[in-house]
Amino acid sequence: MPFIEIKSHIPDTSLGLWNIEEDEYFFLERVKLYDNEWVQLGKVIHPQKRLEWLSSRLCLKYLLDIKDNTRIESLRKEDGKPYLSNKAFNISYSHSQQYSGAIASSSNEVGIDIEYLKRLRYIRTRFLFLD
């Protein structure tokens, strides 16, 4: 299984990555989308981006130990920040190339961003973000 849980040193916060090796059907079987999520996914045309989008949602389910047949609804605030309908966790998603990630916290605002570093623009600006 390509889910990788990352130990977080921040209390009440879980972080994970998904190494995308599966096809779209694998994720669709397990994510159990709501209507608004189907609409969001329908706007994603490129097959790789669809895999990235779906895998980040499944990554969150694994982080929160939500079983495959259980549904959680991911919504978006006006500013685009994702949140869960039950508001039990602050969440964020990211994806780039063959990886996606999710972070969830029951007590902190969170954000995650994954970037594929071989892109020239990130190599030139990496000093702004990486230690």
Image: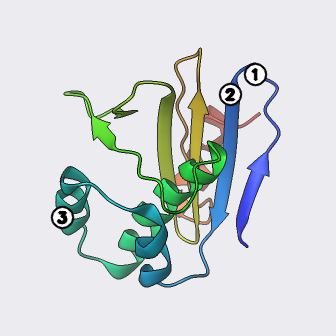
Residue type at numbered disc 3: Lys
Q: Dot 1, how many residues are within 10 Å of its Cα: few (below 14), some (14-19), or many (20+)?
A: few
In the rendered image, which quarter is residue 113 located in? top right
Q: Position of residue 31 (x, y in %)?
A: 44, 62
Check contact, mark 1 vs mark 2: CB within 8 A.
yes
Give the residue number, with chain letter if any, for mark 2: 13
Give the residue number, with chain letter if any, for mark 3: 43
Observer-nearest residue: 20 or 126? 20
| 127 lies left or right of 111 | right
Q: Identify whether 127 is placed above or below 38.
A: above
The alpha-carbon separation of the residues under discs 1 and 2 comes to: 6 Å
Mark found first going from the N terminus, 1 or 3: 1
Q: Identify whether 52 is placed above or below 60.
A: below
In the rendered image, which quarter is residue 48 located in? bottom left
Q: Position of residue 82 (x, y in %)?
A: 36, 36
Q: Identify whether 102 is placed above or below 4.
A: above
Q: Mark number for residue 118?
A: none
Residue extending farthest to the top is: 107
- The residue sitting at 61% across, 81% down in the picture is 21
Q: Dot 2, how many residues are within 10 Å of its Cα: few (below 14), some (14-19), or many (20+)?
A: many
Residue type at numbered disc 1: Ile
Q: Dot 3, how many residues are within 10 Å of its Cα: few (below 14), some (14-19), or many (20+)?
A: few
Mark found first going from the N terminus, 3 or 2: 2
Give the residue number, with chain letter if any, for mark 1: 10
Quadrant occupied by the C terminus: top right
- The residue sitting at 78% across, 32% down in the picture is 8
Q: Position of residue 123 (x, y in %)?
A: 61, 54
Observer-nearest residue: 104 or 45? 104
